[in-house]
Image (cartoon, grey):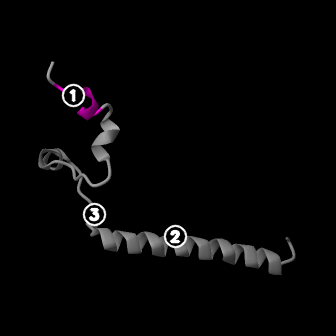
């Protein structure tokens, strides 16, 4: 038993740890493809815009309720 147990992966979740890319064999067996493949920067911008839009909608509803006298 020459293997070091500490270096072995204990659970499948470790496969997706930060900084690691899926292996090419995993990518080739994947059956679904992204509808809009985005780079990391584009994905971050999209998530930020969607989150700002959600907050704007929430605050819009709060403002409408405050003006309407229901709050």
**Relative to 55, 31 lies left or right:** left
Q: Nearer the viewer, mark 2 or mark 3?
A: 2
Q: Quadrant of residue 11?
A: top left
Q: Residue at x 33, y 74 (%)?
A: 42
Residue 15 location in percent, x, y? 28, 42
Quarter that holds the C terminus:
bottom right
Q: Determine if the magenta segment contains residue 30.
A: no
The disc, 2 or 3, on the residue closer to the chain's N-terminal end is 3
Label located before the other in sequence (2 or 1)? 1
Q: Nearer the viewer, mark 2 or mark 1?
A: 1
**Crowding at label 2, few (<14), some or many (≥20) Cα neighbours within 10 Å?**
few
Residue extending furthest bottom? 67
Instruction: Magenta stretch: give its range.
Output: 3-9
Q: Which residue is mark 1?
A: 4
Determine whether the residue tagged by mark 1 lies in a helix, strand or loop: loop
| Residue 10 location, quadrant | top left
Q: Seen from this angle, which residue lies furthest top? A: 1
Q: Which residue shows up at 54% across the image and 75% down it?
A: 53
Which residue is under mark 2? Answer: 51
The label number, if any, that marks residue 47 in the structure image: none
Q: Secondary structure at mark 2?
A: helix
Q: CA distance from mark 3 to mark 1?
A: 41 Å
Image height of 28 relative to 36, above or below: above
| Residue assigned mark 3 | 35
Distance from the alpha carbon under mark 2 to that under mark 1:
44 Å
């Amino acid at each position: 038993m020459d293997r070091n147990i500490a270096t072995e992966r204990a659970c499948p979740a470790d496969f997706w740890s930060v900084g690691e890319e899926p292996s090419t064999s995993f990518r080739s067996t994947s059956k679904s493809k992204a509808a809009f493949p985005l780079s990391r920067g584009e994905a971050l911008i999209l998530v930020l815009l969607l989150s700002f839009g959600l907050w704007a909608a929430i605050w819009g509803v709060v403002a409408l309720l405050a003006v309407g006298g229901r709050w």
